[in-house]
């Protein structure tokens, strides 16, 4: 049986904020663009930041690196906190939604939800499940699927068809217990990137994003989005 496919979500912070708001997250925190990586442009991002999303091209160089990284870490297991919420991606083109779930699920102490929030309900119901079980649960979650579909059609660019091969991928960076985690549903486990803090999460995540960019110097299709406390 083929795995289900969704329409790709555009890397548009307004679409993302509306998406999580439609699923019952209160708009006390908002997604916003990170316009550049130098300190001056990073200083323009509203603080605090509780999650960073990276959209990047899946190239041959990246796939080779991903394979090497997996083999290495299988032989040298990382110390991953049991508090990290991590899920696998089994739905084609759902990486945007999975990135948003990773961003939100690992920041429940900061974020606020409506009492009947479908997103909060999904996170609570799946929090103790294995990463593959969470993925299967998402395949059956109609409220998230329907919201994803409507959000995917709302972007500024025309949404590609469900079957079109999209070679851009979303991942999330979060702080859990003072460690920076890269959460990617295409990987078998979270990746630990060392120490971080609530104050330095953006800068620390950007340092990892720079490594992604340096791996493919000819590429320009990188987008960084921060989940910040609403400053208005």
Image (cartoon, helix red, strand yellow):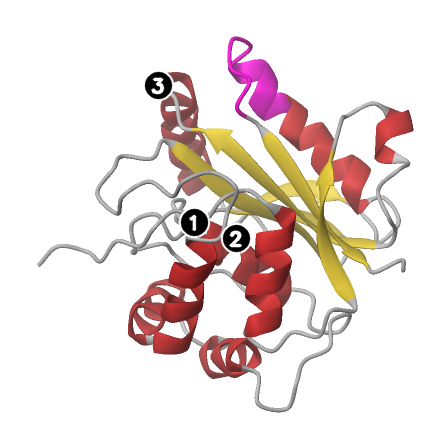
What is the secondary structure assignment of the residue under circle 3?
A: helix
Q: Circle 1 sits on which residue? A: 95
Q: Are marks 2 and 1 in contact (CB under 8 Å)?
A: yes
Tell me if residue 188 comes above or below residue 145 in the rendering.
Answer: above
Where does the image place residue 85, in percent across and percent down from the top left? 55, 65
Residue 154 falls within the magenta-colored stretch: no
State which region is magenta. Answer: 211-221
175 over 40 or under it: above or below: below
Q: Nearer the viewer, residue 70 or 220?
A: 220
> Could you classify mark 2 by the number of other residues whose Cα lies within 10 Å: few (under 14), some (14-19), or many (20 or more)?
many
Q: Are marks 3 and 1 in contact (CB under 8 Å)?
A: no
Report the side of 118 relative to 43 (left or right). Answer: left
What number of labels is visible? 3
Q: Is residue 83 visible?
A: no
Q: Residues within 10 Å of mark 3 (few under 14, many from 20)?
A: few
**Where in the figure is residue 202, as x and y percent of width and height?**
78, 42
Q: Quadrant of residue 68?
A: top left
In three-dimensional space, the C-alpha distance between marks 3 and 1, rounded to whole angstroms, equals: 19 Å
In the image, 121 versus 85, the foreground residue is 121
Q: Which residue is mark 2?
A: 99
Q: Which residue is mark 3?
A: 60
The answer to whether residue 107 is visible is yes
* Distance between mark 2 and mark 1 Cα atoms: 6 Å
Mark 3 or 2, nearer chain start: 3
Residue found at the far bottom of this picture: 115
Q: Position of residue 219 (x, y in %)?
A: 51, 15
Q: Residue at x 66, y 31 (%)?
A: 208
| Front tag of 3 and 1 | 1
Image coordinates for residue 71, horizontal then vertical, percent: 38, 33
Give the residue at x 57% y 24%. Answer: 212
């Amino acid at each position: 049986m083929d795995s289900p496919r969704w329409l790709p979500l555009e890397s548009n912070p307004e679409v993302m904020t509306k998406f999580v708001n439609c699923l019952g997250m209160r708009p006390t925190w908002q997604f916003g663009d990170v316009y550049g990586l130098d300190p001056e442009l990073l200083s323009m991002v509203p603080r605090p930041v509780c999650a960073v999303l990276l959209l990047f091209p899946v190239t041959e160089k990246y796939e080779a690196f991903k394979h090497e990284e997996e083999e290495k870490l299988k032989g040298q297991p990382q110390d991953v906190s049991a508090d990290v919420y991590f899920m696998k991606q089994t739905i084609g083109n759902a990486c945007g939604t999975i990135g948003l779930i990773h961003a939100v699920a690992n920041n429940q102490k900061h974020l606020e939800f409506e009492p009947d929030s479908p997103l909060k309900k999904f996170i609570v119901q799946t929090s103790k499940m294995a990463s593959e079980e969470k993925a299967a649960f998402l395949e059956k979650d109609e409220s998230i699927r329907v919201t994803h579909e409507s959000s995917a059609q709302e972007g500024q660019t025309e949404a590609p068809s469900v079957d079109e091969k999209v070679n851009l991928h979303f991942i999330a960076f979060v702080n859990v217990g003072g460690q920076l985690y890269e959460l990617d549903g295409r990987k078998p486990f979270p990746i630990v990137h060392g120490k971080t803090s609530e104050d330095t999460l953006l800068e620390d995540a950007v340092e990892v994003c720079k490594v992604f960019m340096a791996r493919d110097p000819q590429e320009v299709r990188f987008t960084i989005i921060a989940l910040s406390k609403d400053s208005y």
